[in-house]
Image (spheres, rainbow, N blue to C red):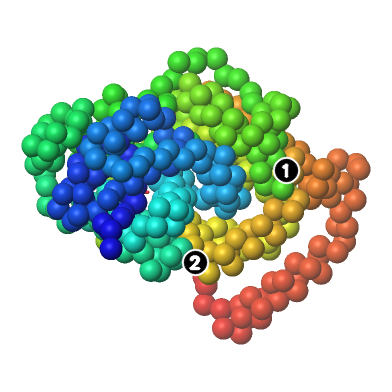
């Protein structure tokens, strides 16, 4: 029997660099470091070097940006997904795709185990572990950061002792997770929910524009496909909107959210494209979805967001909701006109070849075709129950 082998989700940061060494030295694994590029940016050559230097037997960087956009972000757009009405699920969407690539790599490298660098207090450990078990129930899961009990200083000392090259300083101010769909910033001064986030935490949402401008987003079956008439891939479209809306300071979110593990936590996010695309998509649905479908969809999309937040991406209920959402998008094709202003975004126009908006029904001018005479009977019968109650039992003065 050779050595046990493990695939580690590698970010290039202090914790996962120390983890490469720790898993090799303390647990005796051969470590394969895998980084999944979901648009987090950074220098992947440097990252590869660092993992190798820390002792990884192999390092892979997997470009999953298009897959992330098309298979994870797109469904979130169709669901207008905002956890607790506010958070566009930035980190929640990346964990299942990273898990999928870890599980695939484990197969390629004949590894018995998979590891991640999450702490025991967050949602991300839940998302990784539930996803990994859903995709391959036989893999062992190791969570070094949850087990080793190192403080940040301890990790830096361990790195120094074992000659692991890191560029961390003893005080790390914030915990940041970033991808194509946005940026999450935690810790530091923000742990006091009363204190304003320090200006320096923001990177994507710094308002440099002062004049309002207009942008038209085109959708096909719920999928954003163009900006101002130019067809783009979803990755390109999101990148462009992040820059454009970010330059108006649009997309900041400051909230106290309920984590899956029972903790209320103060979270700050930047998600310019997500906020713009969800606003535009939801607005296009207002003209293309029939009323009952629209109302039920709101309920389902809330549940979808909760499930995905909770790490249940690969679950039968989520798959069933996906079928509902997919069906609902058949006629969600058209354009939405957004007006951008410093720190604000408005939908000011929408049109669709499948619009249910009927001018001759809605208008108050002479072209009105609505059958006014039908309203009298409809309203009388609609209110009949309350009328009967009022005459026999009513106690309202
Ligand atoms: N609270 C958010 C979530 O659960 C963001 C987590 C960000 N992760 C991080 N390591 N900073 O989705």
Q: From this viewpoint, is residue 322 visible?
A: yes
Nearer the viewer's eye, disc 2 or disc 1? 2
Write down the residue under mark 1. Answer: 220
* Residue closest to the eye, 60 or 233: 60
Vertical placement of residue 288 versus 171, above or below? below
Q: Is residue 194 visible?
A: no
Q: Is mark 2 within 8 Å of ligand 1?
A: no
Q: Quadrant of residue 20?
A: top left
Q: Which image quarter: residue 376?
A: bottom right
In the image, the residue with mark 1 has its CB under 8 Å from the nearest atom of ligand 1: no
Label 2 to label 1: alpha-carbon separation: 27 Å
Residue at the image point whose x is 75% and y is 74% from the top: 381
- The first of marks 2 and 1 along the sequence is 1
Q: Nearer the viewer, residue 353 or 321?
A: 321
SS for dot 2:
loop
- State the residue in front, 390 or 290: 290
- The reply, left or right, for residue 95 in relation to residue 234 is left
What's the mark number on residue 324?
Answer: none
Count of numbered tags = 2
> Looking at the picture, does residue 148 appear above or below residue 283?
below
Q: Work out which quarter of the rendered image holds the N terminus and state it.
A: bottom left
Other-residue count near label 1 (Cα within 10 Å), few / some / many at <14 / 14–19 / ≥20 = some
The reply, left or right, for residue 234 in relation to residue 195 is: right
Percent position of residue 33, x then y: 34, 44
Residue found at the far front of this picture: 1
Left or right: residue 294 compared with residue 86: right
Which residue bears the numbered disc 2? Answer: 315
Of residues 252 and 349, which is closer to you in this image? Answer: 252
- The residue lying at 48 percent from left, 59 percent from top is 313
The percent position of residue 260, horizontal first and vertical second, equals 33, 60
């Amino acid at each position: 029997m050779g050595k046990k082998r493990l695939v580690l989700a590698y970010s290039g940061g202090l914790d996962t660099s120390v983890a490469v060494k720790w898993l090799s030295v303390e647990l005796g694994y051969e470590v394969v470091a895998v980084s999944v590029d979901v648009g987090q940016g950074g220098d992947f050559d440097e990252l590869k070097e660092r993992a190798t230097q820390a002792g990884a037997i192999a390092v892979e960087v997997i470009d999953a940006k298009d897959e992330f956009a098309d298979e994870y972000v797109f469904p979130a757009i169709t669901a207008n997904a905002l956890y607790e009405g506010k958070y566009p699920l930035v980190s929640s969407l990346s964990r299942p795709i990273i898990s999928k690539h870890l599980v695939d790599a484990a197969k390629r490298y004949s590894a018995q185990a998979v590891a991640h660098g999450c702490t025991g207090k967050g949602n991300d450990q839940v998302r990784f572990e539930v996803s990994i078990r859903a995709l391959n129930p036989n893999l062992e899961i190791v969570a070094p950061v949850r087990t080793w009990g190192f403080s940040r200083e301890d990790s830096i000392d361990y790195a120094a002792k074992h000659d692991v090259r890191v560029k961390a300083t003893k005080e790390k101010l914030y915990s940041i997770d970033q991808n194509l769909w946005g940026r999450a910033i935690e810790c530091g001064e923000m742990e006091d929910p009363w204190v304003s986030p320090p200006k320096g935490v923001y990177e994507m949402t710094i308002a440099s524009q002062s004049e309002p401008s207009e942008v038209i987003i085109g959708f096909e079956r719920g999928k954003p496909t163009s900006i101002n008439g130019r067809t783009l891939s979803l990755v390109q479209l999101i990148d462009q909107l992040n820059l454009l809306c970010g330059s108006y300071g649009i997309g900041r979110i400051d909230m106290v959210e309920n984590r899956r593990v029972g903790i209320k936590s103060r979270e700050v996010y930047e998600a310019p494209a997500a906020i713009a695309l969800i606003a535009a998509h939801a607005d296009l649905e207002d003209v293309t979805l029939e009323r009952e479908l629209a109302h039920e969809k709101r309920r389902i999309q809330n549940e979808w967001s909760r499930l995905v937040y909770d790490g249940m991406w690969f679950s039968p209920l989520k798959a069933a909701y996906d079928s509902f959402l997919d069906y609902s998008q058949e006629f969600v094709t058209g354009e939405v006109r957004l007006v951008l202003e410093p720190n604000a975004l408005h939908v000011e126009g929408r049109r669709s070849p499948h619009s249910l908006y009927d001018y001759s029904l809605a208008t108050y001018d002479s072209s009105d075709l609505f059958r006014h005479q039908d309203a009298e009977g409809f309203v009388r019968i609609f209110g009949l129950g309350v009328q009967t109650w009022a005459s026999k039992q009513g106690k309202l003065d």
